Amino acid sequence: MLKLPHIRTSKENKSRVASLTHRLKFRAENIVARISLAYSLEQGVKLKLSELQDSGGKEYSPIVLFSDHEPYYIGWVCCLYQIHSKDERIPKYLKLHLDDGIILIEEALNANSDEDPIRVLMEQTL
């Protein structure tokens, strides 16, 4: 299996992660990152590598981002994009989905700003 490098959000998403962490009352920013990544992948939308954003934002080591579930995230990407688990593009796809999920979650919370953000998040992910 591919050894994953550290993955960074876009510069713009760094502040979004901090804001979402505060808004959702989480203790650590990696929780928002994990949920964002899973939420984007769960949508089943194949994102284009040509739309990869900058890497000037928050940096996550594989252990912080994936915990001991790294093989599952790699498998998820491989199934979605129909690629091998050693494909060099996997870290780029993970970054695409991390950035995408952050934006999607922020949009969902903003569209339902009068509701409890945890409830909105739960409804979006069910």
Image (tube, grey):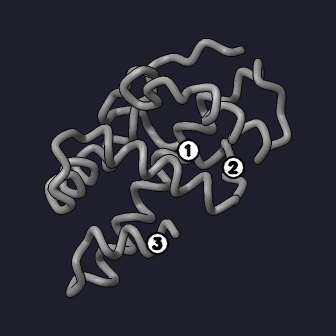
User: What distance separates the C-alpha of mark 3 from that of mark 1?
Assistant: 19 Å
Across and down, in percent, residue 109 comes to 31, 73
Residue on which disc 2 sits: 48
The residue sitting at 45% across, 65% down in the picture is 104
The disc placed on residue 64 is none
- Judge from the rendering whether residue 81 lies leftward or rightward of residue 91; answer left or right: right
Give whichever of discs 3 and 1 has the lower sequence position.
1
**Foreground tag (2 vs 3):** 3
Across and down, in percent, residue 96 comes to 55, 44
Amino acid on which the number 3 mark rests in the picture: Gln
Tell me: residue 30, above or below residue 36: above
Across and down, in percent, residue 20 comes to 24, 57
Q: Secondary structure at mark 1?
A: helix
Tell me: residue 91, above or below residue 46: above
**Which of 56/29 is in front?**
29
Amino acid on which the number 2 mark rests in the picture: Lys
The residue sitting at 45% across, 22% down in the picture is 62
The residue sitting at 21% across, 39% down in the picture is 28
The residue sitting at 39% across, 64% down in the picture is 105
Across and down, in percent, residue 106 comes to 34, 66
Q: Quadrant of the N terminus?
A: top right
State yes or no: discs 1 and 2 in contact (Cβ < 8 Å). Answer: yes
User: What distance separates the C-alpha of mark 1 from that of mark 2?
Assistant: 8 Å
- Judge from the rendering whether residue 77 lies leftward or rightward of residue 82; answer left or right: left
Give whichever of discs 1 and 2 has the lower sequence position.
2
Residue on which disc 1 sits: 96
Q: Secondary structure at mark 2?
A: loop
Asked which quadrant contains residue 75, the reply is top right
Amino acid on which the number 1 mark rests in the picture: Leu
Residue on which disc 3 sits: 124
